[in-house]
Image: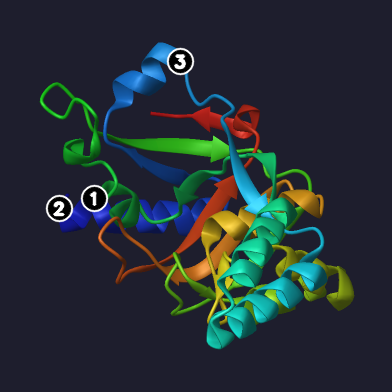
Amino acid sequence: MNIIKIIKEEVNNFVLGEGKTWYHGTPDVRDLNRSGGFVPKTDTTDYFPEYEKWNQVQADMQQARAQGDEDRYFELLDLAGSLRKSFTYKKPIFFTDNSRVASTYADDRRASNYQEAEPKLLKAEIDDKGNTLKIPARGQRFRAIDADIVKKAFINHGIPEKEIDHYYNMFPTWIRNNKISAETIAIIAQQLGFDLVDVEGVLDSYEGGSIESTVRMVFDPQRIKIIS
């Protein structure tokens, strides 16, 4: 992509305003063409509704291991497994307001059939009517965002801290070292009634990220209108 095209797109974004033009890079646009565009997709995740009991079991397991009590350890291991539950959620569809970031995902090497894949940088408009969670995360890595920053964003949108802590505690294996994944943010945001999530100023690209952009997570593909 030449520098003139980049400048034109950045000026266009500024004039139109945030949320008017978004970009999505796909390694093989044929999948979208066959489906007629973006379609709903779901996934399942583990969580621990009885997280206080689960935390206690983890502590007891450590003690049993330290004492060499294998019978007790395996008994607790079975109990821990019974406390693990799963539920289905809508997988987010990711967009960015920076075409250079999206273009890193339009890599045919990521496609299942890379020899015939047709990588594509898509432009889209997204209906942003509804409840949008905005997370100011300038300089953060998109794949591992500071959990306190995300919590503050929820609080600023009127969610009680106690309720946020409740959801955080249910995902102890997905929130570690005070870092939370984008997928986990999407899961919790859906549970709290948000339609979209904008993570502002994050560093993102397929290889890890060094360019700041706003990444938008969309839960309902009907909000997406592909322009080109």
Q: Quadrant of the C terminus?
A: top left
Q: Is residue 102 above or below residue 110?
A: below
> Are dots 1 and 2 in contact, CB under 8 Å?
yes
Which sits earlier in the primary sequence, circle 2 or circle 3?
2
Residue under pointer 3: 35
How far apart marks 3 and 1 lie (CA) works out to 30 Å
- Is 64 displayed left or right of 54 in the figure? left
Identity of the residue drawn at 23% across and 40% down: 110
Q: Is residue 59 above or below residue 22?
A: below
Identity of the residue drawn at 66% across and 56% down: 78
Which one is nearer the viewer's eye here, 87 or 79?
79
Q: Is residue 57 above or below residue 19?
A: below
The three-letter amino acid code for the residue at tag 2 is Asn
The three-letter amino acid code for the residue at tag 3 is Ser
Please identify, in this view, whether the residue under mark 3 or under mark 1 is nearer the observer.
Answer: 3
How far apart marks 1 and 2 lie (CA) works out to 6 Å
Counting every numbered tag in the picture gives 3
Q: Secondary structure at mark 2?
A: loop
The answer to whether residue 149 shows anywhere in this view is no
Which one is nearer the viewer's eye here, 206 or 88?
88
Identity of the residue drawn at 27% across and 48% down: 103
Residue under pointer 2: 2
Tag on residue 5? 1
The quadrant where residue 174 appears: bottom right
The three-letter amino acid code for the residue at tag 1 is Lys
